[in-house]
Amino acid sequence: MRSLPLGNKFGIPHDLVNAIMLPPVIAYNASANVDGYARVAALLEPRKPAGSAAQLADSAAHEAAGIVACLRADIGIT
């Protein structure tokens, strides 16, 4: 993630830029690391699985971005 240029240009702290950019970065990269992002989703929002392992991993990987966006909103970062 290239947060340094954004932070420098707009005077936003590095950690805040990372929090803002994380959901779209996860969404963009989900298909490149399905298992990894599925694990992130499962750790942040455990649920009962339904479907094949491959379907679950792909779905969870794409849900990881939404879960992180909700977490970000929960702590007041919009």
Image (spheres, helix red, strand yellow):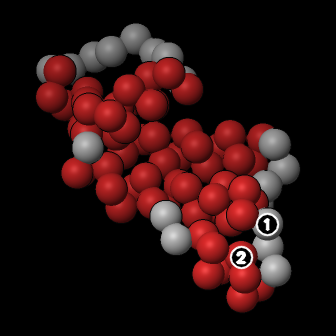
Helix, strand or loop at mark 1: loop
Answer left or right for 73 relative to 43. Answer: right
For disc 1, the marked residue is: 13
Foreground residue, 32 or 65?
A: 32
Tag 1 and tag 2, C-beta contact below 8 Å: yes
Compared with 38, 72 (above or below) is below
Tell me residue 46's x, y (percent).
Answer: 49, 17
Helix, strand or loop at mark 2: helix
Taking the view exactly as shown, the residue that stands out farthest to the bottom is 9
For disc 2, the marked residue is: 7
Tell me residue 22's x, y (percent).
Answer: 55, 56
In the rendered image, which quarter contains the C terminus?
bottom right
Tell me residue 75's x, y (percent).
Answer: 81, 43
Answer left or right for 72 relative to 39. Answer: right
The number of discs equals 2
Q: Residue at position x 52%, y 71% from top? A: 2
Q: Can residue 59 be seen at all in this image of the molecule?
A: no
Foreground residue, 75 or 7?
A: 7
